[in-house]
Amino acid sequence: MNIENKLDKLKKIRQVEAPPFLYNRILHKMEQGTEMVAPIKWRLTFALLSVLIILLNITILIRSKGQNNRSSMEQVASSMKLSTTNEFYDE
């Protein structure tokens, strides 16, 4: 009964009349808006941090290239009792 009352209230909803030229006024205000430009400090900080992150990634890639991670992967596989070979069947 309570739910039916609430649903009946939804049936009474009518469409509201919009003021004339509302859409045109909204478009005009959007076109009039000026572009916001970030302050020079923010732009320089962003550029510096981007360069630092790229350099950090490059150094990590160069250092990890020489290391052999196969032994650590085999240790993880053996501790989880997984097969360390590519064979599907024990033949």
Image (cartoon, rainbow, N blue to C red):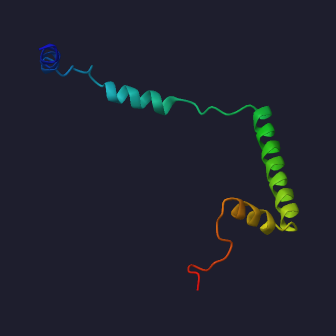
Residue 91: horizontal and vertical position, in percent? 58, 86
Against 53, is 83 above or below?
Answer: below
Return the residue nearer the eye: 81 or 67: 81
Return the residue nearer the eye: 66 or 82: 82
Q: Quadrant of the N terminus?
A: top left
Against 87, is 9 above or below?
Answer: above
Is residue 26 found left or right of 80 in the rendered image? left
Residue 21: horizontal and vertical position, in percent? 30, 25
Q: How many marks?
A: 0
Residue 70: horizontal and vertical position, in percent? 78, 68
Looking at this view, name the residue that lies furthest to the front: 91
Against 32, is 14 above or below?
Answer: above
What residue do we see at 68% from left, 72% from top? Answer: 84
Place residue 42 in its image quadrant.
top right
Place residue 87 in its image quadrant.
bottom right
Against 73, is 15 above or below?
Answer: above
Return the residue nearer the eye: 28 or 10: 10
What residue do we see at 76% from left, 40% from top? Answer: 46
Looking at this view, name the residue that lies furthest to the bottom: 91
Is residue 32 found left or right of 3 in the rendered image? right
What residue do we see at 64% from left, 66% from top? Answer: 82
Is residue 61 found left or right of 29 in the rendered image? right
Residue 65: horizontal and vertical position, in percent? 84, 67
What residue do we see at 17% from left, 20% from top? Answer: 10
